[in-house]
Each structure stands twice: as structure tokens, then as C-alpha cells.
Amino acid sequence: MPEPGRIVVEPLVRAALLEDIGHGGDLTTDATIPPGRMATARVVARRPGVVAGLGAAMLAFRLLDDSMQIDAAIADGEPVRPGECIVEIRGHARAILTAERTALNFLGRLSGIATATRTLVDLVAGTRARVADTRKTTPGLRALEKYAVRCGGGTNHRFGLGDAVLVKDNHLAVTGSVRAAVAAVRAHVGHTVKVEVEVDTLDQLREALDEPIDAVLLDNMTPDQLAEAVRLVNGRMLTEASGGVTSETIRAIARSGVDVISVGWLTHGAPALDLSLEVDGLS
């Protein structure tokens, strides 16, 4: 699960720091902490979860103090228990305190996504289903949020509109039929581009099965309908279930035999993991 590179992450972290520091600096820290004071601090989990986003979080400190010493006790993708230290940092106290909230915002947000993903992945264990995200991401943070899903054991759907074709209900409303939409798509894209079609009913699925597509998105179907859809597809294309997925429903959805279960709330509704930064000492 490769982490997004610094060329992607640094502009996001810089923007977040600028949002917090603004044009006035850190009034409280600048007034109370002498410039040369050093400090040691730890980021500690208050709740159990899965860690994600250490790179972005630690970059917040390093952008304010490039000599910051960082010792991670837990890596991205690994579980953390309440009270457990995730990472210890040592450097200029002003930099630590000024970057604290930005760092915790990234780490808490991304760890929350990874934690929610791991919960769903564990719930479908023993089935063929993979848990996937969607494009319902925070504007500007898609690369990091999709990385967090991978840290939790999930898989990524399209990163953007240019990755693959997904013919949705509104496309069908304009084109008039699955056949017309697929014909238009195949005439427009290259042979290496995968094509998926969203269907709401089994009759729509039967229509889609006659077309040259790679995957079918089964939208808001019951587990019984999904099982019938899987039977109709019979391995000819990938099956994806979407809509109404919760921790209470995902096991039944997975037992229908679908290949992928996509969950939008992983990246737009997962609660942040509760973390704190504790300063252990000043020097």
C-alpha cells in the first residue's frame, strides 16, 4: 500500500498549516515558549483503531522544524490500543505546539477511515467480497483518504473520472438505454479502459448482460436480489454491490456472492480516531 508521495502530500499539509497559522502566527505559543526551548512529545491513542496518515502528520512538524526527530512505534496499517504511543517526537517546542492540531487532524481523520474500513473488512472475512471506497471524498484529500482505505485492508474504486467508465442512472436517463450508452462509450474510449454499468433492477441487469462490459454495479438491491444477480451473471463479469451498506448489513450482502462492496461513507462519514499529543518534557 504505497503512501502518496511528498509531491502530493506537502501542498496539502502546507495549506493546512497556513490555514491555522494565517498571518498572525501562533499567538499563544509565541508568547509563552522561548524560541530555543526543546521538547519531547508523544501522540497517544485514546480509542482502539488502525493507524493511517503518519507521513502527512509528521510532515506538519517537519515543515516547521526540519531537524525534528521522529520515532514511530506503530506503522500505518497497524492496530493501536487505547493509551498506546503511536509516535514520539523531539524538537523545538514552538514547532511541536504550533503544528499539533494540523498533525492530529490528518492522523485522526485518516486513522478513522482506516479503522472503519478494517471493521468492515473483518465482517466480510471468509467471503469473496472486497470492501471498496468511492469518489465521495473530502475535496483535495482524495489521495490521502483512499490511501487510508488501503491501510484498513480495503481496495480503491476509481480515483477519478478518467480512470474507468461507470455508466450511472443519469447517463442512462439521457442516452435512453444500456445498449445505447455502452455503444457510445465503446466508440469513445480505448480498448484498455474498463466499462461498468449501474443497474437498479434485475431486468436492467439482463439487458446489461448482452453488452460488452467488464463489471456491473448492483445499486440498492436486497441480499436476495444480489444473490439472484450473481446467479445471472455467472462469472461473466465482476459484480459490485452498493447502497445501504452498514456494519449491520454488510455480512448479508457479502454472503450473496458479490465480488466488491463499495461504501461511500468510509471516506465521508467515518469518525476520526480520538488521539492526543502529550508533551513529556521541556529542555
Image (cartoon, rainbow, N blue to C red):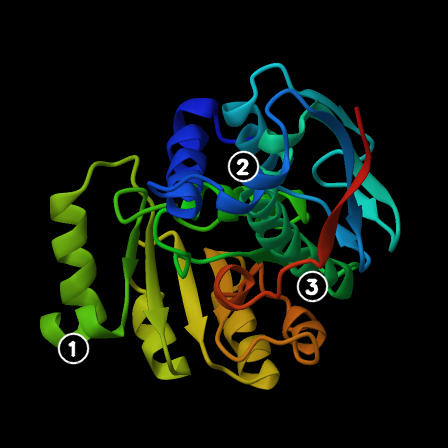
Mark 1 or mark 2, earlier in chain: 2
* Front residue of 157 and 279: 279
Q: How much space separates mark 3 and mark 1, taking CA atoms?
A: 33 Å
Which residue is tagged 3? 120
Label at residue 30 = 2
Task: Please state the horizontal and vertical placement of residue 262, each as a whole percent of the image.
Answer: 51, 63
Callout 2: SS: helix
Q: Is residue 212 left or right of residue 18?
A: left
Look at the image and tell me in which quarter the N terminus lies: top right
Q: How much space separates mark 2 and mark 3, taking CA atoms?
A: 44 Å
Specify the amino acid type for callout 3.
Leu
Specify the amino acid type for callout 2.
Asp
Label at residue 173 = 1
Task: Please state the horizontal and vertical placement of residue 75, each as a whole percent of the image.
Answer: 75, 33
Query: Which residue lies at the image location 12% right of the left edge and 45% below the top edge?
Result: 188
Callout 1: SS: helix
Query: Which residue lies at the image location 55% right of the left edge and 35% below the top edge?
Result: 56
* Front residue of 191 and 164: 164
Specify the amino acid type for callout 1.
Ala
**Location of residue 35 with respect to 180 vertically, above or below:** above
Q: Is residue 158 left or right of residue 226?
A: left
Task: Please state the horizontal and vertical placement of residue 114, each as a whole percent of the image.
Answer: 65, 52
Q: How much space separates mark 1 and mark 2, taking CA atoms?
A: 59 Å
Q: Is residue 220 left or right of residue 1?
A: left
**Location of residue 203 with respect to 109 vertically, above or below:** below
The answer to whether one can see residue 81 in this image is yes
Mark 2 or mark 3, earlier in chain: 2
Label at residue 230 = none
Query: Which residue lies at the image location 73% right of the left edge and 62% below the top edge?
Result: 119
Q: Nearer the viewer, mark 3 or mark 1?
A: 3
